[in-house]
Amino acid sequence: MTRIITCLSGKGGVGKTTLVANLGVALAGMGMDVVVLDANLTTPNLGLHLGIPLSPTTLHDVLKGNAKLIEATYLHDSGLKIIPAGISLKDMKGIDSRELPNILLELLGSTDIVLIDAAAGLGREALAAIEAADELLLITNPELPAVTDALKAAKLAEQVGTKVSGLVVNRITKKPHEMTRSQIAGMLEGIDVLAEIPEDIAVQESIAKRTPVVSHKPRAASSQTIRQLAASLIGEEIKIEKPWHHRLFGFLR
Ligand SMILES: Nc1ncnc2c1ncn2[C@@H]1O[C@H](COP(=O)(O)OP(=O)(O)OP(=O)(O)O)[C@@H](O)[C@H]1O
Ligand SMILES: [Mg+2]
């Protein structure tokens, strides 16, 4: 059965695209047939994260009825498939994002997991990505404005009738001003915190290299957390390898 999972945040810039690109590569590495789709139709950049900045045929062409979904599907080195969106302003003309759920029907049965990168906000574009999904993965940063917007996103999902599978907290620094896991869980009552991804310079370095951090720096703390999340999404378990200095101090103790 094909699972369609949308990554949604409400607030912009919290890490949706980074998570979708990395989860996609991690799941493909676990033998899953995965498609990642850029439903951020106005400011798409999933292709950039995966080193495919320009594509001759995109989701925009499919939404306009000018191409088939398979023609807008590209194979990444990792085995992951990507459906990018058009990056030029003129691609936006004549687009109706409400067609997205219908277009995705074509993928049902032919793939294990479809990961959708939603647009920021909770407008029409994000709504189409919610409606197209079977389940939602909420993502937030450990600060009040982002958590408030995640809560709003969860309420909208409830109205639409799309299940929220859980919450990912991204860019954790453990500084005193940051919201704690229990404060976040308290605000988003009933939603499980599935992963806490640390603030990690390796993520930014990997974006500059246009390679997801799980392949660029597989041992980085962020990579290990994302791989663990990917495994848990498919009912598997993997252990996080501690950095050498933690292992050394553990041994000395
Ligand atoms: N764990 C992390 N550690 C450090 N930096 C991060 C991390 N996750 C994301 N970032 C930084 O945050 C930026 C924004 O991430 P990303 O583009 O994935 O957010 P987004 O939610 O998709 O944004 P938008 O709402 O605009 O689509 C990245 O370019 C990267 O620099
Ligand atoms: Mg994005």
Image: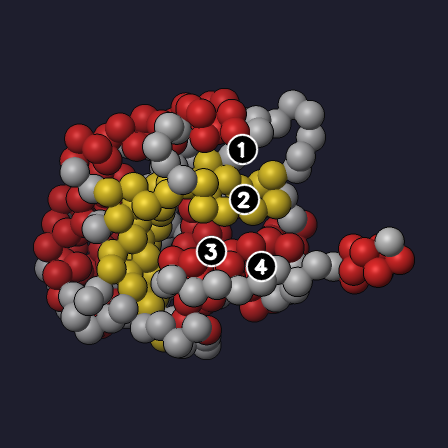
N-terminal of the pair, mark 4 or mark 2, is 2
Would you call the spot at circle 2 few (<14 residues within 10 Å), some (14-19), or many (20 or more)? many
Q: Are marks 3 and 1 in contact (CB under 8 Å)?
A: no
What secondary structure is marked by label 3? helix
Number of numbered markers:
4
Q: Amino acid at mark 3?
A: Leu
Q: Quadrant of residue 179?
A: top right
N-terminal of the pair, mark 4 or mark 1, is 1
User: Which mark is drawn over residue 205?
Assistant: none
Would you call the spot at circle 1 few (<14 residues within 10 Å), some (14-19), or many (20 or more)? few
Q: Would you place residue 225 above or below residue 217 in this image?
A: above
Would you call the spot at circle 3 few (<14 residues within 10 Å), some (14-19), or many (20 or more)? many
Q: Where does label 4 land, which residue?
A: 223
User: Which mark is drawn over residue 196?
Assistant: 2
Q: Would you place residue 177 above or below residue 36 in this image?
A: above
How far apart, in angstroms, are the residues tagged by discs 3 and 1?
Answer: 16 Å
Judging depth in this view, the residue of 139 and 21 nearest the camera is 139
Q: Where does label 1 land, which residue?
A: 181
Q: Is mark 3 within 8 Å of ligand 1?
A: no
Q: Where does label 3 land, which residue?
A: 229
What secondary structure is marked by label 2? strand
Give the residue displayed 60% in from the left and 39% down from the top: 172
